[in-house]
Amino acid sequence: MTRKPVLLAALLLALGQPAFALEPAGAQALRQVQQRWAEINYQAPEAQREAAFEQLAGEAQKAVAAEPGAAELHIWHGIVLSTWAGAKGGLGALGLVKQAKAEFEQAIELDPKALDGSAYTSLASLYYQVPGWPIGFGDDDKAETLFKQALALNPDGIDPNYFHGDFLLRQRRYGEARAALRKALAAPDRPGREVADAGRREEARARLAEVEEKLE
């Protein structure tokens, strides 16, 4: 897998209004997983991330087991698994990515609008970053379809616009990529997501610089 730090980094989306409210314990577990994820992904030394994500994946899995009907918890278990895969790297990470894919698909079945449709963004990111057949299940056409669904639900969100911009950059659709990344940078702040927002904006600025270089 390429672009290890980017692989499924994160997919952090502000809490939307799910069809069914999380139980208090589940909501607290969700906040803790989100906060810890941001700390690991953006502040921890790279050498420590794989082990830290592995531990966090166990905590996220326990939260899902306690409230299996909560799409939000499935989404975040998938996010942790996918970023753990990114930290792990190599073909050995494909098993984790497949588990993450199953979690996002389960979340969509439970509540496609959960977390402003973040399961669609997460799944789209898998499809464009994972290798295609015969190694993996990557599929750019599926990724594009999923991004359309994600952006229909959260058109101004930082994460769907950032990942869509990165996808478009890889597709060499530079003008579209620039528009998406600029929109990501203009996205509103998310209360309680300061670390995640700062990290995502730094990534968006880096991708935008790549785009501007291509357009010169």
Image (tube, rainbow, N blue to C red):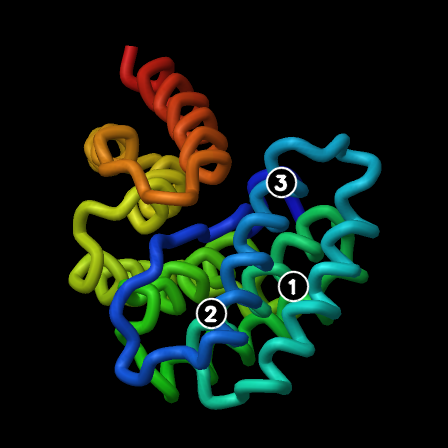
Residue 58 rendering spot, x and y as whole percentages: 74, 69
86 in relation to 179, above or below: below
Q: Hey, which quadrant is residue 64 in on the image?
A: bottom right
Of 175 and 86, which appears nearest the observer? 86
Q: Which residue is mark 3?
A: 39
User: What residue sits 34% from the left and 60% below the top?
Assistant: 15
Of 35 and 103, which appears nearest the observer? 35
Q: Is residue 214 visible?
A: yes
Q: Which residue is mark 1?
A: 81
Q: Nearer the viewer, mark 2 or mark 3?
A: 2
In the visual, does 84 lie left or right of 15? right
Residue 139 rendering spot, x and y as whole percentages: 45, 64
* Residue extending furthest toward the top: 216
User: Looking at the image, is mark 2 or mark 3 earlier in the sequence?
Assistant: 2
In the visual, does 93 lie left or right of 122? right
- Label 2–label 1 contact, CB within 8 A: no
Residue 57 rendering spot, x and y as whole percentages: 70, 65
Q: Which residue is mark 2?
A: 27
* Label 1: which secondary element: helix
